[in-house]
C-alpha cells in the first residue's frame, strides 16, 4: 500500500501543463525522493482520466493498453510504499458516481487519499480558455464566447472545468477537510516557480535542486494569431476535424508556423465583462472561505485584477490577419500571395493535407 496518493484533478488553465511538464521531467528524481508518478508517460494519466470520466468519444479511440490505464495506475500505486501522484485536468469534469468510484479505488491503494485542485482567477482564465478552444478547433468568436459563458447557456462545459467550489465538493466527498487541497495560482508578475513550490509543499515533495526552466516553446498566441486560427477553423469541414488533425495543430502548426507570425499583443478581458466576473469570483472566494479545505496561497488572488485597456481578437483587422497569414504561408513553404480569403483557404488546405492520420488518440493531448 502507498502511504498517500494525491489526485490532481485540475482546474484547466491553472498552470496544469507547467506542473505536469515538471513532474514528468523530474519523474526519476521525484521517485528517488519518495514520490511516484505511476504509468510510463504523461499520456497514461490522460487515458486514465478519460476512462474514469467516461469520455466515450475518446475511449473508443484508445488502444487496449490505454483503456486499462486507470486500473494499472491504481495497481502500481498499491505496490508503492511511499507517496504517489496522478494528474490530469479532465478528472475535474467527472460525474458524481465516477468520482466516488475513483476515490474508492484509490482508498484501496493507499492509506490516505488526497485531492488537489489548482485554481486561477477568472480574469486570466477566460482569455486563456478561449485560446485553448480555438487550438482545439473552435469557431466561436471571443466576444460570443464571453457572452455565452456569462449566461451559462449552451456552454456549461466551461463551468464544469472552472467551478472551483463544485469541483472541490465533488472530489472531496468523504475526505477529511485537510486532505482536500486548494493551491491558488499566484497573481500575474509573481515568480514563475511559486506555483511549483506551492504544489510541492502540498505533496510534501523535496524539489531542492530541480530546475523549473521551460523546455518547451511558448506557443501562447497573440490576438491576431488567435483570430487567424479561429478563421482558419471556419474553413475546415467539421466532418474532417479528426483527433489527428487537432494534435497536429497543437503540436506542430501552432508552435512552428503560427506563433510569432504577428507582433506579440496579448488580449484582455473587456471592461464590460469585469463586473460579472468580479461578482462571480467574490462568491467563489466567500464559498471557499466557509469550507475547511487546506488552502495554499491567498484566496484573494482568485479575484480578478482591475480591467486593463487593450484590444481583443475581435479587433484584429483584415490587414493584420493577411500579414500574419502570409507569414504563416511562407513558413509552410507555400505561395503567400493573394487575398485574406485566399490565405485562409490555403492554410486550411495545408492543414488537411498534413494533419490527417488514423483516428486514434485524442485532440486533448
Image (cartoon, rainbow, N blue to C red):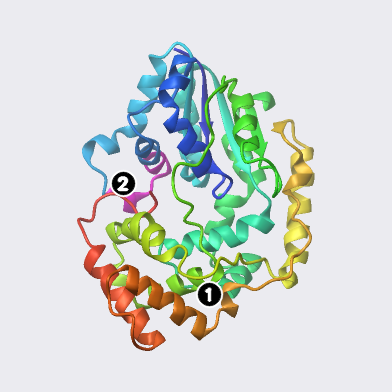
Farthest residue toward the left? 358
Up/down of 230 relative to 303, above or below: below
Up/down of 177 relative to 99, above or below: above
Up/down of 103 relative to 252, above or below: above
Chief SS of the magenta region: helix
Q: Please say whether residue 270 is one of the residues in the magenta stretch.
A: no
Question: For residue 141, which numbered disc appears in the image?
Answer: 1
Mark toward the start of the polypeptide (1 vs 2): 2
Question: For residue 59, which numbered disc appears in the image?
Answer: 2
Residue 63 shows in the view: yes
Give the distance between the C-alpha atoms of the residues marked 1 and 2, in whole angstroms: 30 Å
Residue 15: x %, y % from top left: 56, 44
Question: For residue 363, which numbered disc appears in the image?
Answer: none
Q: Secondary structure at mark 1?
A: loop
Residue 226: x %, y % from top left: 49, 68
Residue 77: x %, y % from top left: 41, 20
Q: Please say whether residue 58 is one of the residues in the magenta stretch.
A: yes
Q: Which residues are magenta?
A: 49-60
Quarter assignment of residue 75: top left
Seen from the viewer's position, the closer of residues 338 and 112 is 338
Residue 175 shows in the view: no
Q: Secondary structure at mark 2?
A: helix
Quarter assignment of residue 37: top left
User: Marks 1 and 2: which is nearer the front?
Assistant: 1
- Residue at x 40%, y 16% (from the top left corner): 78
- Residue at x 56%, y 23% (from the top left corner): 207
Seen from the viewer's position, the closer of residues 331 and 184 is 331
- Residue at x 76%, y 41% (from the top left corner): 299
Residue 265: x %, y % from top left: 59, 67
Quarter of the figure that contains the N terminus: top left
Q: In the image, 306: left or right of 71?
A: right
Amino acid at each position: 500500500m502507498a502511504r498517500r496518493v494525491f489526485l490532481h484533478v485540475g482546474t484547466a488553465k491553472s498552470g496544469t501543463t507547467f506542473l505536469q511538464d515538471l513532474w514528468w521531467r523530474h519523474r526519476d528524481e521525484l521517485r528517488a525522493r519518495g514520490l511516484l508518478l505511476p504509468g510510463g508517460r504523461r499520456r497514461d494519466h490522460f487515458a486514465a482520466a478519460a476512462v474514469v470520466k467516461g469520455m466515450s468519444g475518446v475511449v473508443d479511440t484508445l488502444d487496449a493498453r490505454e483503456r486499462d490505464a486507470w486500473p494499472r495506475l491504481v495497481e502500481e500505486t498499491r505496490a508503492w510504499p511511499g507517496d504517489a501522484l496522478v494528474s490530469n485536468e479532465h478528472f475535474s469534469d467527472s460525474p458524481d458516481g465516477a468520482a466516488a468510484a475513483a476515490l474508492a479505488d484509490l482508498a484501496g491503494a493507499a492509506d490516505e487519499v488526497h485531492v488537489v485542485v489548482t485554481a486561477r482567477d477568472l480574469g486570466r482564465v477566460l482569455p486563456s480558455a478561449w485560446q485553448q478552444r480555438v487550438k482545439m478547433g473552435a469557431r466561436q468568436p471571443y466576444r460570443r464566447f464571453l457572452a455565452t459563458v456569462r449566461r451559462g447557456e449552451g456552454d456549461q462545459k466551461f463551468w464544469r472545468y472552472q467551478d472551483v467550489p463544485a469541483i472541490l465538493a465533488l472530489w472531496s466527498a468523504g475526505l477529511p477537510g485537510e486532505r482536500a487541497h486548494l493551491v491558488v495560482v499566484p497573481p500575474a508578475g509573481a515568480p514563475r516557480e511559486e506555483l511549483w513550490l506551492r504544489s510541492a509543499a502540498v505533496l510534501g515533495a523535496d524539489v531542492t535542486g530541480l530546475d523549473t526552466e521551460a523546455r518547451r516553446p511558448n506557443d501562447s498566441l497573440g490576438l491576431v494569431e488567435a483570430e487567424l486560427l479561429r478563421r482558419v477553423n471556419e474553413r475546415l469541414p467539421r466532418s474532417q476535424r479528426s483527433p489527428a488533425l487537432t494534435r497536429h495543430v497543437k503540436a506542430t502548426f501552432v508552435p512552428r508556423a503560427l506563433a510569432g507570425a504577428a507582433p506579440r499583443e496579448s488580449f484582455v478581458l473587456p471592461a464590460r465583462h469585469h463586473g460579472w466576473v468580479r461578482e462571480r469570483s467574490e462568491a467563489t472566494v466567500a464559498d471557499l472561505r466557509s469550507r475547511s479545505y487546506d488552502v495554499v496561497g491567498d484566496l484573494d488572488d482568485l479575484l480578478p485584477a482591475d480591467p486593463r485597456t487593450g484590444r481583443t481578437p475581435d479587433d484584429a483587422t483584415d490587414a493584420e490577419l493577411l500579414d500574419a497569414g502570409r507569414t504563416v504561408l511562407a513558413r509552410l513553404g507555400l505561395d503567400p500571395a493573394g487575398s485574406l480569403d485566399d490565405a485562409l483557404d490555403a492554410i486550411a488546405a495545408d492543414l488537411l493535407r498534413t494533419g490527417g492520420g488514423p483516428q486514434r488518440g485524442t485532440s486533448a493531448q
